[in-house]
């Protein structure tokens, strides 16, 4: 079970405090403690995440305290600056000039004349929050964000500036185009910047790099394919235990939304708990066996059927060469997990085979894909497990969040909420508006209940941005995240507060 805590260094943005945050982060990364799964630096605090099944919180706190006592804080701008060529051609340059009373040329000179510090990484993979922009040319964030900002776009909002690594919505003011990609999953290293770096921009001319493309995780030429995808389901994603120690780059952990069911599927065929499986959503794929294999399915929302014979979920079964595996939708639940004895063979990125669509790592299954077994071995079929019931009548447990306040917690406990639009990044809750708003950007724990200024809460899931600037009055208890993953749009949700 994932847990975590924040180490605070200041209450407001301070370059010296931020330097201390990153100095400790580097010390922790240099001497990792088994069981710690991530360290994510915000503007003024550091979030330490760990697996309670491997290490207890007291041991983690002793580790962080010992390293903090022995870490010397550097000067805020101690690193040699990295220089990024910029074509200053943004559509908001004229607005910046008008707002400041300066010429466009002078705005460019002042923006490119500063040395910026990377205070934090997040929002999207590789996005660096940099400051501080010259006060004379600052522009506030746009009231209406653009639906799409192109990859490599240089922008600013208030005292911050940054480069959009990937196409995404954005409310910052557009100044130009970076002529070097700050993130490309095909490149080594994939990230140009890290938190704590210092950066300068060099006005330049030239062509922008191409938009980054998705990294393929399926083996390009499988030697011994076991299954062929005839028809894809709604969203069939390869996942394993998740991408650890990647949050400091703004990269999602990914992994299964319902880790309980994924581990159960692997256990039924004798695989390690974090072996790659297929996460199926609402409607599974149609697969043809190219050799005899032992599979297991655990989860909800569907049941497997081999050549038309409907099978029970939560058991292992044989599919012989030439047989077809389908999935029949069932009432209750949303996701299920398909495991194969020996595990699926997949390429890895930063130590994980999990697909991360937001980070352009992997992709959903498509017709014609060939799935290979990593280690072919004999396995017995017929094992079964008793499923845990995701009964919607049971309240979801909440624990107080970093921006806890009595009014928001009372609204969550007493209000009526319905599951709204959801994806692997987050689940919107429709109902009573909660007090929320903006905070200084910090790490976003898995399961955090985030409340933007509009008051509509969102439960943050595996593919969330690792850094966020909205209040988090509560967090779903880690043990109840598998239940959240099985909720369907339109279901009613109730909460109750616990301490741990």
Image: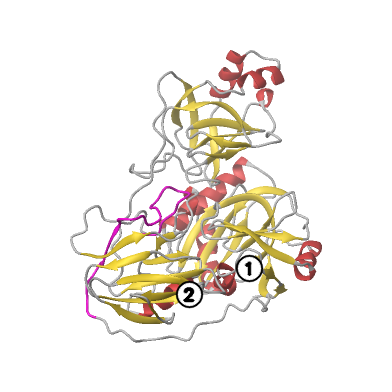
**How many residues crowd around disc 1 within 10 Å: few (fewer than 14), some, or many (20 or more)?**
many
Q: Is residue 377 magenta?
A: yes
Where residue 145 sits in the image (x, y, percent)? 65, 37
Q: Is residue 462 magenta?
A: no
Q: Is residue 350 above or below residue 474?
A: above
Q: Earlier in the sequence, mark 1 or mark 2?
A: 2
**Among the 4 quarters of the image, the one containing residue 105:** top right
Which mark identifies residue 299?
Answer: 2
Can residue 241 be seen in this snapshot? no
| Left or right of residue 174: residue 144 | right
**How many residues crowd around disc 2 within 10 Å: few (fewer than 14), some, or many (20 or more)?**
many
Where residue 266 sits in the image (x, y, percent)? 37, 75
Which quadrant is home to the C terminus?
bottom right
Considering the numbered disc 2 on the image, is that residue within a helix, a strand or a loop?
A: strand
Q: Is residue 248 above or below residue 409?
A: above
Which mark identifies residue 476?
Answer: 1
Magenta highlight range = 353-378
């Amino acid at each position: 079970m994932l847990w975590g805590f924040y180490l605070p260094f200041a209450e407001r943005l301070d370059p010296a405090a931020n330097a201390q945050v990153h100095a400790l982060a580097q010390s922790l990364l240099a001497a990792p403690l088994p069981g710690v799964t991530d360290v994510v630096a915000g503007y003024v605090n550091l979030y330490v995440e760990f697996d309670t099944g491997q290490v207890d919180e007291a041991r983690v706190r002793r580790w962080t305290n010992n390293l903090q006592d022995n870490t010397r804080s550097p000067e805020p701008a101690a690193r040699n600056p990295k220089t990024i060529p910029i074509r200053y051609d943004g559509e908001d340059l004229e607005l910046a000039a008008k707002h400041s009373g300066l010429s466009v040329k002078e705005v460019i000179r002042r923006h490119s004349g500063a040395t910026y510090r990377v205070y934090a990484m997040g929002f999207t993979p590789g996005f660096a929050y940099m400051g501080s922009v010259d006060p004379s040319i600052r522009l506030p964030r746009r009231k209406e964000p653009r639906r799409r900002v192109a990859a490599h776009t240089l922008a600013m909002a208030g005292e911050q500036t940054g480069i959009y690594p990937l196409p995404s919505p954005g409310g910052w003011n557009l100044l130009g185009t970076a002529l070097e990609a700050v993130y490309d999953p095909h490149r080594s290293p994939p990230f140009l910047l890290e938190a704590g770096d210092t950066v300068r921009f060099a006005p330049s001319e030239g062509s922008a790099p191409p938009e980054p493309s998705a990294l393929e995780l399926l083996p390009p030429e499988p030697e011994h394919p076991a299954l062929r995808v005839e028809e894809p389901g709604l969203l069939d994603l390869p996942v394993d235990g998740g991408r650890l120690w990647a949050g400091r780059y703004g990269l999602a952990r990914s992994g299964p939304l319902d880790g309980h069911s994924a581990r159960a599927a692997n256990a039924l065929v004798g695989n390690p708990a974090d072996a790659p499986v297929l996460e199926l959503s609402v409607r599974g794929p149609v697969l043809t066996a190219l050799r005899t294999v032992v599979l297991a399915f655990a989860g909800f929302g569907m049941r497997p059927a081999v050549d038309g014979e409907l099978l029970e979920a939560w058991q292992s079964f044989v599919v012989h060469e030439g047989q077809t595996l389908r999935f029949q939708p069932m009432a209750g639940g949303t996701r299920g997990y398909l495991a194969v004895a020996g595990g699926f063979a997949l390429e890895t990125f930063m130590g994980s085979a999990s697909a991360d669509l937001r980070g352009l790592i992997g992709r959903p299954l498509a017709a014609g894909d060939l799935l290979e077994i990593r280690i072919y071995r004999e396995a017995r079929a017929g094992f079964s497990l008793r499923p845990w019931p995701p009964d919607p009548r049971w309240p979801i447990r909440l624990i107080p969040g970093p921006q806890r306040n009595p009014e928001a917690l009372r609204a969550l406990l007493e209000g009526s909420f319905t599951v709204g639009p959801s994806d692997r990044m987050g689940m919107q809750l429709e109902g009573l508006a909660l007090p929320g708003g903006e905070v200084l950007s910090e790490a976003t724990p898995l399961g955090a209940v985030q409340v933007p200024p509009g008051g509509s809460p969102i439960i943050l899931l595996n593919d969330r941005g690792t850094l966020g600037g909205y209040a988090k009055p509560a967090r779903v208890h880690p043990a109840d995240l598998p239940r959240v993953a099985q909720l369907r749009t339109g279901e009613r949700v109730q909460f109750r507060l616990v301490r741990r």
